[in-house]
């Protein structure tokens, strides 16, 4: 089955014959002319299960250390200590009143999960998880960076160590460990992208960044059908029966690999398309920086091509299958904002700020981009906020903007179906407002929002047509009262 985090786009409204000359530039759309998304009632039938103890996060995001997936029969959670836990899936269990979902940590009557089906111990934090071949495909971050297939009864069928391809860690620290950054499935084929980071002395640079990475195509029995290696940092994978798209967010060795998007043949792994917003003649231009260190943040598939979140010029792109730009969307492009956080005016000192579009999801109902934190062009700190910070932007398959909506806080990743996008909201490392913690569910076509709050930060999410599941992690802000908020637990709501 397709990964719930990447739905294969099917449907009307995307004309493969559109040319660059007739493309839509959605940056010309006035957001004030689009109807604001309506707020639907909160999600229902809430249930919670404890995942034990974990060190709380702080004011800054800690990166992924948990994952969750919804199979037909279970809610499966991958934990920071490496364990996999499967709970019986009962979408009707829990509180039925929608208003009981607001701040569940303050309401001890939230329902309990159905019994735990099985538990499988592990040694490395689970950072990626998706249903596959009547089980779950698992990715970890650690000394080995495992890809594992665990069946519906909790038995491990096979595992492979990505360190065999990307190399062992040069240092025993989290950021240097082999990391399975993305897992995707389509039909009877699984795909995993893994990377390893280090700093290596090169001519003229004693601290040069380097990445070793590999993309695998894996059959259900664990056979690796092909590998695609690159000296770059993969961040996302999207696949259907005709192509495998890989997004790269760092290309520090341009002579070895300098493409933000690569499309591969699913049967052979041969390259079908290379595209990069820094060099494409119909992208970037005066808006982008050809020397930008970060090319692409995410990719999704549309019937006619690709949806790309560009880090190079802070825009969203819809591409035809040959890489021709069909539409572009102004998302986090630099703007001048007052340093005190207000609107810029002639007398107020300003910072020029931008925001990265970190995620994109596509389905027959449309495409949604999700924008991350604000950063200043000069320095590292600012009180200014980019107007699109922590915003979801929905467009149709031709690139016309339909809606914009607040997602609350920083999102580590997103999950989607054909008609919806789920966003887990974590802390804003500058504002540190706990009221934003939780899950937002957006209708791809209209932007209508359903929401549920969590006391701690929501860091992982899974979505099906019937249910939403999310992992909550505790957090302790450095400038607050010092108390830990939230708990390490998994939530499930009925849609």
Image (cartoon, rainbow, N blue to C red):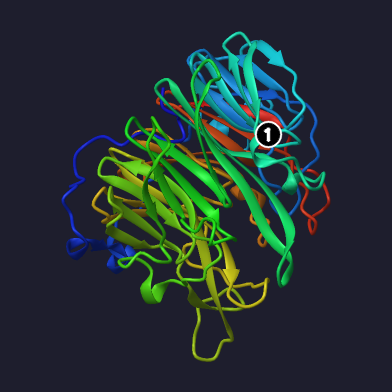
Taking 418 as reference, is 176 above or below it?
below
Taking 202 as reference, is 85 above or below it?
above
Q: Would residue 480 be found to the left or right of residue 285 on screen?
A: right
Residue sitting nearer the eye, 158 or 415: 158
Q: Residue at x 27, y 55 (%)?
A: 399
User: Residue 293 sits in which quadrant?
Assistant: bottom right
Total marks in image: 1
Residue farthest along the bottom direction in this orientation: 347
Q: Quadrant of the N terminus?
A: top left
Q: Quadrant of the C terminus?
A: top left
- For label 1, the crowd category at 10 Å Cα-Cα, with few meaning under 14, some 14 to 19 and many 20 or more, is few
Q: Would residue 465 be found to the left or right of residue 231 on screen?
A: left
Q: Residue at x 74, y 58 (%)?
A: 200
Residue sitting nearer the eye, 380 or 457: 380
Q: Position of residue 226 (x, y in %)?
A: 49, 31
Secondary structure of the residue carrying tag 1 is helix
| Residue where numbered disc 1 is placed | 164
User: Residue 430 sits in which quadrant?
Assistant: bottom right
Taking 61 as reference, is 22 above or below it?
below
Q: Position of residue 167 (x, y in %)?
A: 70, 41
Q: Is residue 112 visible?
A: no
Q: Position of residue 352 (x, y in %)?
A: 54, 78
Q: Residue at x 43, y 71 (%)?
A: 288
Q: Is residue 236 visible?
A: yes
Residue sitting nearer the eye, 84 or 239: 239
């Amino acid at each position: 089955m397709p990964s719930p985090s990447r739905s294969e786009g099917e449907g009307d409204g995307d004309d493969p014959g559109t040319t660059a000359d007739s493309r839509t530039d959605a940056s010309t759309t006035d957001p004030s002319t689009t109807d604001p998304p309506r707020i639907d009632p909160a999600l229902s039938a809430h249930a919670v299960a404890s995942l034990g103890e974990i060190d709380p996060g702080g004011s800054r995001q800690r990166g992924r250390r948990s994952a969750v997936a919804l199979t037909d029969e279970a809610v499966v959670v991958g934990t920071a200590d490496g364990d996999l836990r499967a709970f019986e899936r009962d979408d009707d269990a829990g509180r039925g009143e929608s208003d009981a979902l607001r701040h569940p940590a303050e309401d001890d009557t939230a329902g309990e999960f159905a019994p735990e089906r099985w538990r499988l111990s592990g040694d490395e934090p689970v950072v990626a998880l998706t249903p596959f071949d009547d089980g779950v495909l698992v990715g970890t971050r650690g000394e080995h960076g495992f890809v594992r297939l665990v069946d519906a009864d909790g038995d491990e069928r096979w595992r492979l160590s990505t360190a065999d391809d990307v190399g062992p860690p040069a240092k025993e620290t989290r950021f240097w460990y082999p990391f399975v950054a993305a897992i995707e499935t389509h039909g009877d084929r699984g795909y995993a992208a893994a990377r390893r980071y280090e700093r290596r002395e090169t001519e003229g640079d004693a601290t040069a960044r380097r990445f070793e990475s590999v993309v695998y195509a894996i059959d259900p029995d664990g056979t690796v059908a092909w590998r695609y290696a690159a000296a770059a940092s993969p961040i996302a994978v999207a696949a259907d029966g005709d192509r495998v798209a890989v997004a790269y967010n760092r290309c520090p060795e341009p002579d070895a690999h300098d493409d933000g998007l690569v499309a591969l043949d699913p049967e052979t792994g041969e390259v079908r398309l290379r595209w990069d917003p820094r060099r494409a003649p119909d992208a970037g231009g005066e808006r982008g920086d050809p020397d930008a260190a970060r090319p692409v943040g995410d990719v999704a598939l549309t019937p006619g091509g690709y949806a790309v979140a560009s880090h190079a010029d802070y825009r969203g792109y819809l591409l035809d299958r040959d890489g021709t730009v069909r539409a572009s969307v102004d998302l986090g492009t630099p703007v001048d904002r007052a340093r005190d956080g207000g609107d810029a005016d002639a007398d107020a000192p300003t910072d020029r700020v931008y925001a990265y579009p970190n995620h994109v999801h596509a389905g027959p109902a449309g495409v949604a981009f999700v924008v991350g934190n604000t950063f200043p062009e000069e320095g590292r700190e600012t009180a200014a906020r980019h107007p699109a910070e922590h915003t979801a932007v929905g467009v149709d398959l031709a690139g016309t903007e339909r809606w914009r909506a607040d997602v609350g806080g920083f999102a580590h990743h997103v999950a989607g179906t054909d008609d919806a996008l789920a966003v887990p909201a974590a802390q804003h490392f500058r504002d540190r407002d706990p009221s934003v913690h939780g899950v937002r569910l957006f209708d791809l076509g209209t932007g209508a929002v359903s929401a549920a709050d969590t006391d701690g930060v929501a860091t992982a999410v899974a979505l099906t047509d019937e249910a939403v599941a999310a992992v909550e992690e505790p957090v302790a802000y450095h400038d607050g009262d010092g108390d830990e908020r939230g708990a390490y637990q998994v939530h499930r709501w009925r849609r």
